[in-house]
Amino acid sequence: MSMKDSQMEYGKILEDAYKIYLDGSVEITDTMVLRLVGEKDTYKITGTPSNNNHFLHHHKVVVQKQRKPIKLGV
């Protein structure tokens, strides 16, 4: 996520923030912690996931990398 996008959306610059897009069939809430396949880092969801249904059904989610990865049960 660029500094400009972060400033416009949250009123401040978020470090290590990323926009990700998930398939619309995935159930996601703003309290979830995510880990991307093949990574050790964990990410918390910032804000509320939004549903974008323009052409493809998907969720737009802004995540922020956590300073200390947490252990996730999988």
Image (spheres, rainbow, N blue to C red):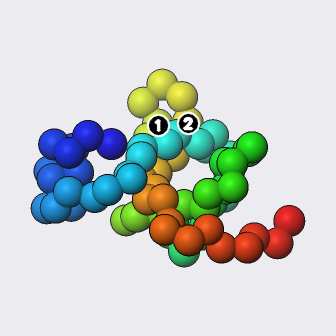
Do labels 1 and 2 touch, CB within 8 Å? yes
Residue at far right of view: 74
Q: In which quarter of the image is residue 52?
A: top left
Helix, strand or loop under label 2:
loop
**Label 1 is placed on what type of residue?**
Asn
Q: In this view, does 7 lie above or below 55?
A: below
Q: Nearer the viewer, residue 16 or 12?
A: 16
| Residue, disc 1 | 53
Q: What percent of the width, then of the height, locates residue 47?
A: 37, 65
Q: Viewed as shown, does residue 28 lie left or right of 74?
A: left
Helix, strand or loop under label 1:
loop
| Residue, disc 2 | 57
Q: In this view, does 23 lie above or below 48?
A: above
**Label 2 is placed on what type of residue?**
His
Real-space Cα separation, disc 1 to disc 2, in angstroms? 5 Å
Categorize mark 2 by other alpha carbons within 10 Å: few (<14), some (14-19), many (20+).
few
Residue at far top of view: 55
Q: Quadrant of the N terminus?
A: top left
Q: Which of 1 and 49 is in front in this view?
A: 1
Q: Quadrant of residue 3?
A: top left
Categorize mark 1 by other alpha carbons within 10 Å: few (<14), some (14-19), many (20+).
few
